[in-house]
Image: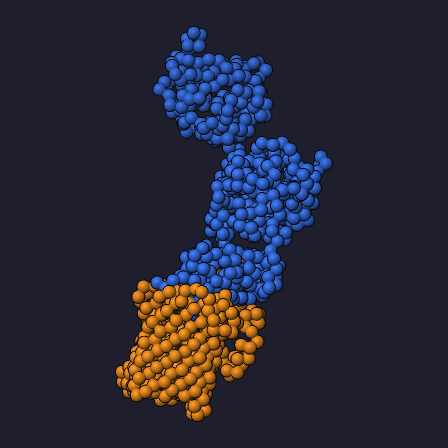
Amino acid sequence: MFVAAFALPLLVLSICAPSSHPIIAEVFYDAVGDDTGHEFVEIFNPAAVPFALGGARLEAGDGAGAGRWSLRWSGAATDTIAAGGRFVVGGALVVPAPNALASLDLQNGPDAVRLVWPDGAVEVVGYGAHTLAEYFCGAPVVDAPSGQSLARIPDDSDVGSNAQDFRAATPSPAAANLPGRDAALIAGTLAIVPEQPAAGTPATLAGAVHNHGAELIAEREVEIAVGETLAGSETPLGSAFVDAQLAPGDTARFAIPLPGLAAGKRLLRVRARLAGDASSANDLDSLRVRIGAGPLEVTEIQFHPGNGEGEWVEVRNRAGAPLSLTDFSLSDRRGAPGQPADGSDVLAAESLAVLAQDRVAFLAHFPALDTSRVREVKPWASLNNSNDSAGVADVVTLRESDGTPCDRVPYSAAGVPAGVPLERRADGFWAPATDPLGSPLAPPRALPPLSGRFAVSPRRLLAQGSRATSIGWDLPWPRARIVVELYDLAGRRVAQVLPETEVPARGERVWSASELPPGLFVLALVARAEDGVESMTLTQPLRIEGSAP
Amino acid sequence: MSGLGVDLMWIRRARRGSVASVATPTSLRAFVLGSAALAVFATGARAQDFEAPAPAWPIGSACVLLERGLPASTPTPTLEGVVTRWHGLAALTTRAVSGALGWRSARLGVGLSQTGEPDVGWTALAMAVGAAGSNGGGALRAVARRDRTSPFRFDARGADVGVEIGGGAWISAATALHVWASAPQLWTRGAAPPLARPLEVGGALDLGDVVVWLGRAAVAGYPRGGRGEHTLGLFTGAGPLGVWLVARDQPLRGGLGVAARARVLRVAAEVESHPVLGETARMSLGLGGER
């Protein structure tokens, strides 16, 4: 009743930013999840002299009806806002801690807050679709999405309308909404290239910086420094200046050479330095990286199961000590990481385990396996079966529970027969499994030696049956790129059996000629050594039986 | 690093680089050297059982009668043995013997051929009958094939027999202009032939010591006119010696052949190259016949 009785005369005096008074600069009323303790209202004093807040009243308005204002906070005699300073009224969970603690209990729009000064000046900030004029000034602001505040931008904006003075922004209590000079690291852009460098191998840290302020930042004004915290002290690893000029709102990428690091998990801390930077909160970021191989490695990938067993990934504990699979996550290139479910026993050193999309279906297909080493992963990252324009179908990624990379395997589906998994050979090379069903919980089957460089078996394919033949090679180089093509007896190219593929020295592919007409053909394997200098062409005849048309 | 697509440049380099020692056996190298080291250009091989090293014109070989149904203009009897190594593959070697004879305008040819190692090879028996004169001729030809079971023997296994029947004809359209057509597989039954051979047409301009010819062969699996293989050849002779060059497309390739005659004895050799596969080499020894 008391509040309602004063509503009408106050409405007459309310303006968007009363002169010679501090103004409301930011309102945060809808945190992600529970709002309790996170709400705040920031008051900004644009004047060059301090301003006493004693007697000032911060009220919340319920736009559902006329005159529904209620007090949330009132300034004490000792409360003062410094010249150009900010005074935050908010909950206990606001960071940094507010100047005055208050349970604001602000509702989502259409609602409002207002600041009533002892001298009768009133400022109203309304948000949401209002029908009552007392709850806004000029025009109300559009409701901010959950997790964002309504911020006055620039901080002293006063164009006669809440809708034009305020807009949704990342909450910045006690900091300028649009600082004069502010270089900010863009969250989520930090990356190390290569993603998992070998121990002692130089790498590059890349990221992006944003001019979050209102002023131009000249070339080489922003310095990006990267360091590592070891034994409580930070060791600098490198730094670089941003060579680009950054206009307000501009973004620039940076790359910092890193020296070779010792093997293991590393936490890199990155800082953007700019003279006169008005906001230090967005100057820091960090990145967890893995140097060298992780404790768990991917050893086999079934991305296109053909018998209803579901997708699965075989992993090996290479840590030299037992580890728990539940401490790891599995993901593809785009999906959310999945966690191994059920079972808490550890995986012994050098042991293999299977992470399955569907444990029951997998064990139904492989009933003889040790069930304790087969875990279902939820959610499962559906692995792609076809390559993108870069020749990569998907990326199988293992991470530790804190997000540190453990193993990452980009794979190509080109040339992999349908239903055949990819497996990591003893030499570290990935190739289609020598056993078409795969070898879960077992090492890859060793290929028998060939009598020559190139073999096709059988060389005669019967009219009935699968018309499948095995194409094997044994090249004189550790790795090579090969192409296998099919020609008829007249030397005309008929088909490409295997597109250009990187292969180990010894390998095999099973190929089906079911689409080809009968006849006598010549298979040509053209191989090029990894260095691209040496090459060779090997040929074998192939007879496909069939009836004359 | 190249992309995942086929890089024909490096495939071709592979053919001409260090690879040659892998794909080309020593015997073939000797053969190439014996053919005046001219194995640079070559032509693709179209026939399969009785393809002899010879220019497209004049027609005089028993093999041409059996393979294409094109009879010689004269009734001179011929006997010819041919060895072909396909694309440098020892496992794909054809050995053939053929003979032809004539009485007045009637022509008759028979031949026996064996190709490849037992798991990919076959044995073929061929016969052709026709008629020819100085201005034209035609013949029907038939070939029966059966798979082999062992090397160096003309035996067969119990697989289906394949039979093909076709024919060909040629005519002298003018004093020096000759045209021909051959459809060697008009009718096929049983096991499919190793190579499908649709219609082939050609024409030759015979200027005496120089013959130029053009040919076009349809390619199986494509609609009529959709795709063809073209041949351009040049033959020249001087006394008992003859040399010819051939160029062919799909893929582009070339070949060279040489022939020599002493009385009734004729020897010939031809080498055909390929941008990816090894060379195809042919040698023949014949008695009788034309130039």
- The answer, for residue B167, to whether it is visible in the render is yes
Q: Position of residue A158 (x, y in %)?
A: 44, 27
Which residue sits furthest left? Answer: B173
Depicted A101 relative to depicted A438: above or below: above
Q: Quadrant of the N terminus of chain A?
A: top left
Nearest the viewer among A146 and A210 is: A146
Depicted B153 relative to depicted A284: above or below: below
Q: Is residue A184 left or right of residue B202?
A: right
Q: Quadrant of the C terminus of chain A?
A: bottom left
Residue at 55% x, 62% y is A455
Q: Position of residue B169 (x, y in %)?
A: 30, 78
Depicted B282 relative to depicted A107: above or below: below
Which residue sits furthest right? Answer: A231
Q: Is residue A210 left or right of residue B236?
A: right
- The answer, for residue A192, to whether it is visible in the render is no
Residue at 53% x, 81% y is B33
Q: Quadrant of residue A221?
A: top right
Look at chain B in the picture and name its colour: orange
Look at chain A in the picture and name its colour: blue
Residue at 45% x, 23% y is A17
Q: Position of residue A353 (x, y in %)?
A: 61, 40
Q: Position of residue B175 (x, y in %)?
A: 28, 87
Residue at 48% x, 56% y is A468
